[in-house]
Image (cartoon, grey):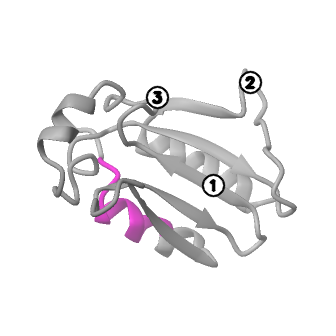
Amino acid sequence: MPKKFNGWFLRAVKDRFDPFSIECRTESNPGSKRLIGYTIRLQNFWIVSIIFGPGSYTENRYTWRESEERPNTRNAYINTTHTAEVSVFSPDGQWYRLKGWNDDFKGHLTVDDVMFIIALINRK
């Protein structure tokens, strides 16, 4: 069974990479507490941004209607997604495009893909 971007993922990131900080990102809608991603600042001050809410390049891309019907379900996306969209930022805040990426972000990545990217950036 494919891994999800839930508590297991966060524990694995903390155990393997000892990040400087992990920020949980929620929707910007007033009153909404739905988790839509994480911002991981590594010890080398590089940032890996991971999102999986509606509109992102994930299997949740077209879940707008469902999300509007369940406005206060905190873990609506975390419990349903096996893919995420990732962006990387250098310590000075600039977008960083990994080799082979055609844009400043990469979508439809699995947990294993994201862990690999974090490992690459962690070695910078």
Number of labels in the image equals 3
Q: Residue at x 50, y 70 (%)?
A: 23
Q: CA distance from mark 3 to mark 2?
A: 17 Å
Please tell me whether mark 2 sits on a helix, a strand or a loop. loop
Front position in the image: 120 or 62: 62
Furthest residue toward top: 102
Quadrant of the rendering where the N terminus is positioned = top left
> Mark 1 belongs to which amino acid?
Val
Q: Indicate the position of residue 88 as horizontal and vertical percent values.
A: 70, 48
Residue that carries the numbered disc 1 in the rendered image:
48
Indicate yes or no whether the magenta region holds residue 92: no
The 10 Å Cα crowd at callout 3, few under 14, some 14 to 19, many 20 or more, is many
Q: CA distance from mark 2 to mark 1?
A: 17 Å
Residue that carries the numbered disc 3 in the rendered image:
57
The 10 Å Cα crowd at callout 2, few under 14, some 14 to 19, many 20 or more, is few
Q: Indicate the position of residue 116 as horizontal and vertical percent values.
A: 58, 47
Q: Earlier in the sequence, mark 2 or mark 1?
A: 1
Residue 95 horizontal side relative to residue 16, left or right: right
Q: Quadrant of residue 31?
A: bottom left
Q: Indicate the position of residue 80 as horizontal and vertical percent values.
A: 21, 42
Furthest residue toward right: 92
> Mark 3 belongs to which amino acid?
Tyr
Residue 105 horizontal side relative to residue 69, left or right: right
Indicate yes or no whether the magenta region holds residue 12: yes
Q: Residue at x 62, y 46 (%)?
A: 117
Residue 58 horizontal side relative to residue 43, left or right: left
Furthest residue toward left: 69
Q: Residue at x 36, y 53 (%)?
A: 29
Quadrant of the rendering where the C terminus is positioned = bottom right
**Which of the labelled discs sits on residue 100, or is there none?**
2
Question: Is label 3 in contact with label 2 (beta carbons under 8 Å)?
Answer: no
Region of the chain picked out in magenta, as a range: 4-13
